[in-house]
Amino acid sequence: MRVCIYEDRRVRDLEPLTLTRPVADLICGLTTLGQKQAHYFAAKTVSHLCRPVVADLIRGRDLVASVNDPTWLRAAPAILVNARWVPPSGTFSPLDSRRALIRSATPNPLADGPYLGTVKGEIAFAVLDMRWLQAVNPVTLDRCLDEWLQALPAYEVAGTLVSRLWELIELNAGQIHNDFALESRQIDAGFRPLDFSLVGPADRLLIHPSARIDPMVVADTTNGPVIIGANAVVHSFTRLEGPCAIGAGSILLGARIRAGTTIGLNCRIGGEVESSIVLGYTNKYHDGFLGHSYVGRWVNLAAATQTSDIRCDYEPVRVSLNNREIHTGITKVGAFIGDHVQTGIGVLLNCGTTIGPFARVLPTGTYAPQEIPAFHRYGPQGLKELKDRNRLLASADTMMRRRGKQLTPALAAVYRSIFGTNAVKSSNLACYTDTLTETMFDDPIMPDV
């Protein structure tokens, strides 16, 4: 089945994480949104329609993928899938004449098109023949989506169209359950080393044989699975509460991992983490609380960095994003932290905080602002733009090489593209301006995206 994953105009609503990656690369549960969509449609071929700035990131990791190529789209019928869609468990079932999703004997579901699968009126996917694909390209996509909503039959389907990052956090526990059920190595569930304490059913515990588990580690699978990936290291006095997942190569140092948490590849995690997603290569090695938060890659959260995830009056949390205050409607929301962010010792982050990539947050004895733009530093004397981009990128490259990675030209181009947006984003934050001078299990469970 030919599937094209596309980004629509609401990609900005998932910042700061989508500033540096395609929407399809966001993790929820054990896998990325793109992997979930490809599995749901049993896709043999996957192409992408995305922002030009992230196109080379996809080309770099998937040499055979078609990216922003209208010729590929027009070659044959295809299913266009919204990158923000978290599909239901199971696999795709085509539509019958009664306009209900059912199992069908039709060998090719594309023959039932054209039609739309919608979630609350928004397009989750579009089954299209070549006639409807003729006008599609990265420039015309949003206009085409509007036209299809007016012209094509639409059917409500299951799944969730994510519009904000906190929705992925709310979905994460359930997605860990679903992904664990699909895990092909589930026959290995129940294995555990000596001196490992298990509370709850053994068939919800999945430890890769190459993981190193010290004595006096506790896993509680009462409410969901606990998954530990290849070459992970779990030190003594760590407690893991399911549903949770620890990515390949990650190290837990006396950590308390609460339910609904996904730790990505090669992280260093200590302290308490609750209902959060950490994409990978992030250091939170010391004590400090991280709750109901979404954290990017190459982040360093210094000792005693604390993240509030609930208001003292228990009212719904408001989030500041792109100079707008957004009412979440939910009472537990933490922080949303972009790639390469660094905090100082004892930094306090209020609930609903967003921090852009490469920001530096210094301790002030009180909460940091709820929105800190990319490439800015906030400290006792206020907010200051970090203008020496070459120095920042060189520092990022040094950090990445210490973990066997490097700053590729495609990734450097993505980072550089963010600089031009900072003046606009910080112009409405005059109360924080200052006059500082510039200073400064064999495969991993988690995908390396």
Image: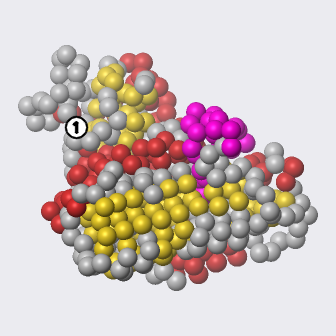
Residue shown at 18%/17% (left/top)?
A: 97
Residue receiving disc 1: 92
Above or below for 62 versus 133: below
Residue 154 in percent (x, y) is at 34, 21
Residue shown at 71%/64% (left/top)?
A: 347
Which quadrant of the figure has residue 37?
A: top left
Other-residue count near label 1 (Cα within 10 Å), few / some / many at <14 / 14–19 / ≥20: some
- Start and end of the magenta stretch? 312-338
Q: Amino acid at mark 1?
A: Phe
Where's the C terminus, which quadrant? bottom left
Where's the N terminus, which quadrant? top left
Q: Nearer the viewer, residue 265 or 127?
A: 265
Residue 156 is left or right of residue 306, and the answer is left
Residue 3 among magenta residues: no
Which quadrant of the figure has residue 102?
A: top left
Residue shown at 48%/47% (left/top)?
A: 169
